[in-house]
Amino acid sequence: MWYNDNWGYRIKITVQNGKVDDDLSDFPCYVNLDDLPDAFFTHVKNGGGDIRITKADGETELAREVVSCDTGTKTGEVHFLADALSKDDDTDFYIYYGNDDADDYAVGATYGRNAVWADYAFVSHDGGITDSAGNLSPANHDTVNEAAGKIGNCRSFNGSDQYIDLGTDTVVFGSNPSVWSASLWFKPDSITGSHNLLSAYDSASGADQNHAINMLTSANDFRWEVKQNNTATEFQYEPPVVIDEWHKIGFTMNKNGLLKGYGNGALRNSDDAPTTGDYTDGGQVRLGVFKYNNNLAYFYDGDIDEVRIITGVEWTAEFISTEYNNQSDTGTFYDIGAEEPLPSAFIPQAIIF
């Protein structure tokens, strides 16, 4: 079957079951358009507004976000919401394109950008400036420079005075959620001392009374920390963080007190965390800095990319490992088929009198 005869071409994308660690539903799948054949960039519109994605039947449309599509440089970034991925069998999808009259969807459309990230509190493909979930308006980012990222572009922090404000924790996470999860890619330029990647914290002078979760690099290692009412839980993992290399880290935390930390797709450690009081109390959520005793400190020196925060969902180990497989090496996560033109049966035939 064919999605719509106004679209002249399609390419099959096949997600490899060996890279999917469990049967997953509603999985945001990243497609690096650099992987597609040159013919794609000959026929797609610059900007990718005519890109549509369907299930294996070739007709059932899926929500997608076209972050970029440059026909000149033959590069681009697309994310689509895969309805299901199988750990036992490969899963096929189709990318349709080649309609000069097609426009990109509005961000709030049924198959538009926001629908891919409907369950997320915050999704930033550029390291914290824009929110593809459509919920937040990050601030204090004018001096944080753009750089080439792990996926598309990212933000590069100078380690001395640059950071990004996402808003208060009650805005970012909602009111005292039962569970929340976060992840990001980072590439440090230096790791002397402590460098904060993500914090949800505002400490009073001389006290640590508020809830905090911090991702920090320090002395060639990485640690998660939860501090509430002067009670701290923290743990580390191996292997050590390496300068000038990309690392994907994240955590899940539920209100029963279990904190799990992940690095490069694997569970690194878990521990009980403080559970007294609320998880949100009006503190600021920041990228690249930490506020302690009313002072900004622990500025991060390096790049941050692909920041994701979700509330009400505790990512499974299999979801996290599959996401890492997808983002770390698209070339092994899926196979790309050859370009298929619109079948002649769908092309109107001239009427001869």
Image (cartoon, rainbow, N blue to C red):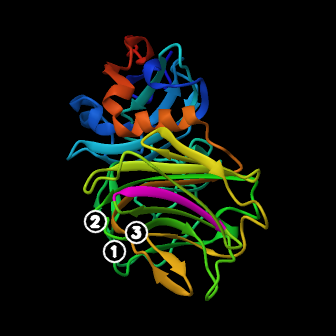
Q: Is residue 337 above or below residue 301?
A: above
Is residue 206 left or right of 144 when viewed as pictured? Answer: right
Amino acid under disc 1: Gly
- Residue at label 1? 159
Earlier in the chain: of badge 2 and badge 3, it is: 2
- Identify the secondary structure beneath mark 1: loop
- Residue at label 3? 195
- Identify the secondary structure beneath mark 3: strand
The reply to whether residue 9 is in sight is: no
Amino acid under disc 2: Ser
Q: Residue at x 34, y 80 (%)?
A: 160
- Residue at label 2? 190
Front residue (pair 324, 77): 324
- Identify the secondary structure beneath mark 2: loop
Q: Is residue 339 above or below residue 258?
A: above
In this picture, which residue range is highlighted in magenta? 220-227
The reply to whether residue 238 is in sight is: yes
Counting from the top left corner in percent of width and height, residue 53 is at: 48, 32
Amino acid under disc 3: His
The quarter of the picture where the C terminus appears is: top left
Cβ atoms at labels 2 and 3 below 8 Å apart: yes
